Image: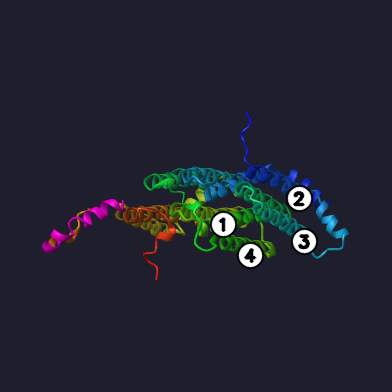
Amino acid sequence: MVPKLSQQTILGIAYAVVALLIAGFYFTGGLGSMLISSGMTKFPPDVTAFSLISLLAAAAMFMNASPLVVLSSATFLGFFVLSIHQEEPLVRYLCLGGVLFAIGMYGMTTSRNAVRVLMSIELMLNAVNINLVAFARYIDPAQVKGQVFAIFILTVAAAEAAVGLAIVLAMYRNTATVDMEEFNLLKW
Amino acid sequence: MENLANLADVNAVSIETWMFYVLAAIAIPFAYGVILDRAIIRSGFLLIGVFGAISGLFLILQAQFIAMAQIMIYAVGITLVVVIALMLTNPRMNLDLKPANGNSKVWGFAFSFLLFAVIYMAIRSEYWPVKGEIPSGANVAVIGAALTGQYSLPFEFASVLLLAALMGAVMLAKNEPSEPETLEYSENIGTNEAETPEAVTSSR
């Protein structure tokens, strides 16, 4: 049984294949040697491949491709290209933390549903936790202080989720909506 | 060719790197699903996938206690609270389909992209004093000693914070008695009686 794909999804998958080819071309060393042989030694190959993938993603979004497929494949392949360049495994974890933090920031600024904003904040807190645990593993393996900080962040995140959702429920009871743009009670 | 040598090193190091990329390939699309999915109840469940992938990352980072705490607190507790809040509000509102005021999507995308660029530059330009040893399997004992010894005061503060947050959440979410206080103004009741209770009930 073949699921019926819309044109948006087909465009998105086509973009993902092209981006995967670019990432593979970088990964096998072809892009770096091509840049060197063409004399453009100033451009670092990882940043070149990343900006190529991002520009193609913007073009695919402009051609009305599915944003979920395009954005997730572009982010993962760009992150792959940027982090395979580094030798240290610590930098990979920090890159992943940065990616998840940026995704959470995007969701927090653009969502209109208040509960989705709270979910984005949880994503950002998790990204910070990845950083702390990676530091505890690679920088401070004897007395794992990063894990202690991660425990405190877990605690504060639980308190934040409870209070934030209670506030959302109280606002919903008073205004019968969870639209962030209707919450203008504290607007100056 | 230099990257091919890198690839051979990666294979020689361990399976850990590949597990990392697999978990990242789960976590990033699920995170996009959380913020872009049209059905918000589905994004509430996709949040479980993100938290599960991150707890897998904690496992390969030798942080067993944090991984289990992550599953218990985030993937079960917080997601449960979020889903219950979604069910108590109206999940069919489809707010994110409506056009937002101004072009907040463009600005949000530009701002988060800039944020990631700054973070990546900061990561890349720094020299990290990485130590080769891995943490011992008994690091739960180290965490326990740190929490009861050096960090006992923040630990107590965290417990007080949790208690205050618990009481605050109960106070905020508690149903207020909907009886209006305007009953004392006996003259006004005759004129406004038809309006005020209707307004309260219809606004729900």
Q: Specify the subunit that label 2 lies on.
A: A
Q: Which residue is mark 1?
A: A101
Q: CA distance from mark 3 to mark 2?
A: 15 Å
Give the residue drawn at x 58%, y 54%.
Answer: A100
The nearer-to-camera label among 3 and 2 is 2
Circle 1: residue type: Phe
Q: Secondary structure at mark 1?
A: helix
Q: Nearer the viewer, residue B103 or B2?
A: B103
Q: Which mark is residue A44?
A: 3
Residue at image coords 60%, 53%: A134
Q: Which mark is residue B118?
A: 4
Question: Label 2 belongs to which residue?
Answer: A22
Disc on the earlier residue, 1 or 2: 2
Q: Closer to the camera, A48 or B139? A: A48
Left or right? Give the position of B31 relative to B189. Answer: right
Amino acid at pointer 2: Ile
